[in-house]
Image: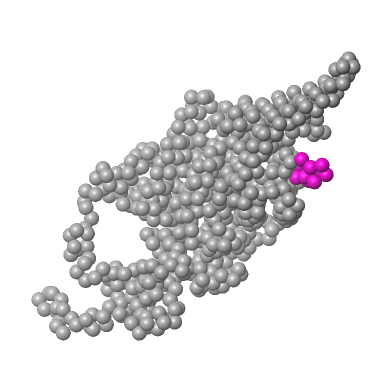
């Protein structure tokens, strides 16, 4: 073995090299730093990552680990939601959760490009192999580093290449306004007017990235410091803030200009979301951006597109292990509560949008855990205060309590989707209808479990002044409940039974549809913030007014039909007076007005027929009258039955989707068929 000669390191024996490398911790070894061979070493203590400092195991230890199939579990990243440095905490030891899951069964969280990356225990790739031998990642062999290999050096002109990815980053940064004061104003408007209810952005974390972005050196071509995941979130906040800046009574030209600018930010965010997984990986910011994109589409009535964007956000969350309650990993309290709320939001979107569009949902209940939602709010607390915080009683609700009831309702929606709207065609058998009634009982039990400030009938609103978020959360829960109940019973509204065994479904459907219509009529939308907050409710995904319109056409002489038609007329009048109503809303209004006109015409015709005196015909005509009447009834049945049954096949088909009102010809044929019957 040789020593240092002439300022150069002489080669050493492989045994000596292995001995030195074995005593160097994995962090110093990866960064090629000096290590004092302590546990934890001084370098890791200085970098504030003592929990990640450990020595690699020997070959004998590796063999014993492999033979016993007990891989060493790396500690989770303490800043898995990109909390500021002051929010970082040393994770607690993994413990077993109440649901029976253990950390050894639910995979590991590993730090990947500044964010947590989830790897299931069944996956045996490079990350699992690295955890097996207590290493974070395999290293390049000696002599294969980027310094000795010119071909692996970064191309200094790569970011200027028009075909390279950084040209797209240049384009995205160019979407931002040049005046920082304007961006500051809009971001502050979003945090003040929307975020307390949307709960979409963690302000402390966002502000850290925001300051770093604006404090970067101008004129520097190195855009690698621009995080596309955070930039996508910024664009969506600006898209909403642009609408907030437009007054509700603005002229058509101003309104159109605001919408165009908002849509530009929206498309900038979607482009950044698509590029971010390739260049930056996944992060909570990307999940938040996906949630805001889906809510933006829901506001404009584009629910089929929101089904796609929410699914993408769900995959980004699953890649970070948000489908697992982080309590089993011992995550810090602030990180734990943030991940729980994000996952509950995605879970609710997935179930509701899938049920509204008649498409499969993304989250499999067997592959995720129920989040242990607590009535606690610690986002504005320090790490020490968050760790010592105590859960509040139910009489003192925080903004987090809403997710507990929303999560339970979303699970019921999943059961409705599975049992009533699967691929197997549903019949009207006794067994099937009993299943519907049992699901309705579960919905009623959920409604009965709501606290007084969330209950459906005569809720207690005394806390709304102190906690403004309660009124909107109440509306979200109510609209979700009515959506689930209408969807469950809508199938049986048009079915006929001589014993009237589907009367319960008709009553339930009418009750929830009227309650939802009353909710829509009560919205005043005095500000753009109110309009945007109301746009996140579930009534934007389904058409309760159309359900009432079809019921009125089916039974024009019903006891409640007259009142239903009056409320529908008021709703149409309100929508036509709304200058912000888009083509989706106006298509719905057009179909509702068709139902109103048809039901009133049928009611007048039936009234005239009942009061018309019978005609006296000659005997010869009377002799043939019974045959002619029977023949005419039979012919009418033949003419009407075909289109009616074909429409029922569409209504009761594999997807059981509610037809879109924008297909006016379809609804016109349907209403005409029901009128003829």
Residue 519 in view = no
Question: Residue 413: horizontal and vertical position, in percent?
Answer: 64, 52
| Residue drawn at point x = 18 percent, y = 62 percent | 149
Task: Spot the residue most to the left.
Answer: 6
Q: How many marks?
A: 0
Spot occupied by residue 45 in the image (x, y as percentages of width and height): 37, 72
**Residue 313, percent from left and from top:** 48, 51
Percent coordinates x, y for residue 581 in the rendering: 57, 30
Quarter-of-image position of residue 25: bottom left
Image quarter where the C terminus lies is top right
Question: Of 543 and 86, which appears nearest the observer?
Answer: 543
Q: Main secondary structure of the magenta part?
A: loop
Can see residue 278? Answer: yes
Q: Magenta residues, as a range?
A: 496-506
**Which residue occupies the foreground of this view, 636 or 198?**
636
Which corner quadrant of the image does residue 673 belong to?
top right
Query: Does the magenta portion include 133?
Result: no
Report the side of 414 relative to 296 (left or right).
right
- Seen in the picture, residue 67 relative to 539 is either above or below; the reply is below
> Which residue is rendered at x = 69% and y = 40% of the image?
516
The residue located at (39%, 62%) in the rendering is 112
Q: Residue at x 51, y 65 (%)?
A: 332
In the displayed structure, 438 sits above or below 659; it is below
């Amino acid at each position: 073995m040789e020593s240092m000669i002439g300022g150069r390191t002489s080669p050493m024996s492989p045994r000596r090299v292995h001995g030195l490398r074995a005593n160097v911790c994995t962090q110093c070894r990866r960064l090629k730093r000096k290590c004092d061979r302590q546990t934890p070493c001084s370098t890791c203590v200085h970098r504030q990552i003592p929990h990640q400092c450990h020595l690699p195991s020997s070959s004998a230890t590796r063999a014993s680990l492999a033979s016993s199939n007990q891989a060493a579990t790396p500690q989770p990243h303490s800043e898995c939601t990109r909390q500021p440095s002051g929010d970082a905490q040393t994770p607690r030891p993994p413990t077993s959760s109440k649901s029976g899951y253990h950390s050894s069964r639910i995979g590991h969280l590993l730090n990947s490009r500044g964010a947590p990356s989830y790897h299931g225990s069944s996956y045996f790739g490079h990350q699992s192999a690295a955890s097996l031998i207590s290493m974070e990642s395999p290293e390049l062999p000696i002599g294969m580093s980027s310094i000795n290999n010119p071909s692996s050096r970064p191309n200094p002109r790569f970011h200027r290449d028009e075909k390279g990815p950084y040209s797209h980053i240049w384009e995205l940064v160019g979407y931002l306004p040049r005046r920082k004061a304007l961006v500051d104003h809009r971001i502050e408007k979003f945090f003040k007017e929307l975020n307390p209810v949307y709960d979409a952005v963690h302000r402390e974390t966002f502000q850290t990235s925001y300051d770093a972005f604006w404090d970067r050196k101008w004129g520097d071509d190195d855009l690698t410091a621009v995080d596309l995941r955070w930039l996508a979130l910024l664009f969506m906040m600006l898209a909403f803030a642009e609408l907030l800046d437009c007054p509700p009574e603005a002229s058509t030209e101003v309104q159109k200009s605001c919408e165009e600018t908002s849509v530009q930010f929206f498309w900038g965010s979607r482009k950044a979301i698509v590029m971010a997984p390739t260049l930056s990986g996944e992060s909570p910011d990307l999940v938040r951006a996906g949630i805001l994109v889906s809510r933006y589409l829901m506001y404009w009535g584009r629910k089929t597109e929101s089904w796609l964007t929410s699914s993408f956000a769900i995959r980004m969350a699953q890649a970070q292990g948000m489908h697992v309650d982080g309590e089993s990993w011992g995550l810090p309290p602030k990180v734990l509560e943030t991940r729980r709320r994000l996952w509950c939001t995605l879970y609710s979107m997935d179930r509701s949008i899938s049920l509204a569009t008649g498409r499969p949902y993304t989250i499999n209940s067997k592959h995720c855990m129920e989040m242990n939602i607590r009535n606690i709010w610690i986002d504005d607390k320090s790490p020490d205060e968050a760790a010592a915080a105590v859960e509040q009683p139910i009489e003192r609700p925080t903004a987090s309590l809403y997710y507990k009831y929303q999560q339970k309702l979303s699970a019921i929606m999943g059961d409705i989707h599975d049992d009533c709207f699967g691929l197997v065609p549903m019949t009207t058998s006794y067994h099937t209808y009993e299943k519907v009634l049992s699901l309705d009982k579960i919905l009623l039990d959920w409604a009965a479990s709501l606290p007084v400030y969330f209950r459906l009938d005569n809720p207690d609103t005394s806390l709304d002044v102190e906690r403004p978020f309660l009124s909107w959360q109440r509306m979200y829960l109510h609209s979700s409940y009515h959506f689930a109940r209408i969807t469950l019973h809508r199938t049986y509204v048009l079915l006929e039974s001589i014993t009237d065994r589907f009367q319960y479904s008709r009553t339930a459907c009418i009750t929830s549809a009227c309650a939802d219509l009353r909710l829509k009529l009560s919205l005043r939308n005095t500000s753009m913030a109110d309009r945007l907050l109301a746009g996140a409710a579930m009534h934007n995904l389904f058409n309760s007014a159309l359900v009432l319109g079809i019921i009125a056409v089916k039974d024009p002489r019903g006891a409640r039909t007259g009142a239903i038609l009056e409320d529908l007329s008021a709703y149409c009048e309100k929508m036509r007076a709304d200058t912000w109503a888009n083509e989706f809303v106006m298509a719905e209004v057009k179909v509702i007005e068709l139902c109103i006109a048809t039901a009133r015409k049928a009611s007048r015709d039936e009234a005239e027929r009942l009061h018309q005196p019978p005609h006296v015909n000659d005997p010869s005509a009377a002799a043939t009258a019974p045959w002619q009447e029977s023949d005419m009834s039979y012919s009418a049945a033949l003419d009407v039955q075909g289109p009616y049954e074909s429409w029922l096949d569409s209504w009761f088909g594999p997807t059981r989707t509610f037809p879109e009102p924008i297909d006016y010809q379809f609804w016109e044929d349907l209403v005409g068929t029901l009128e003829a019957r």
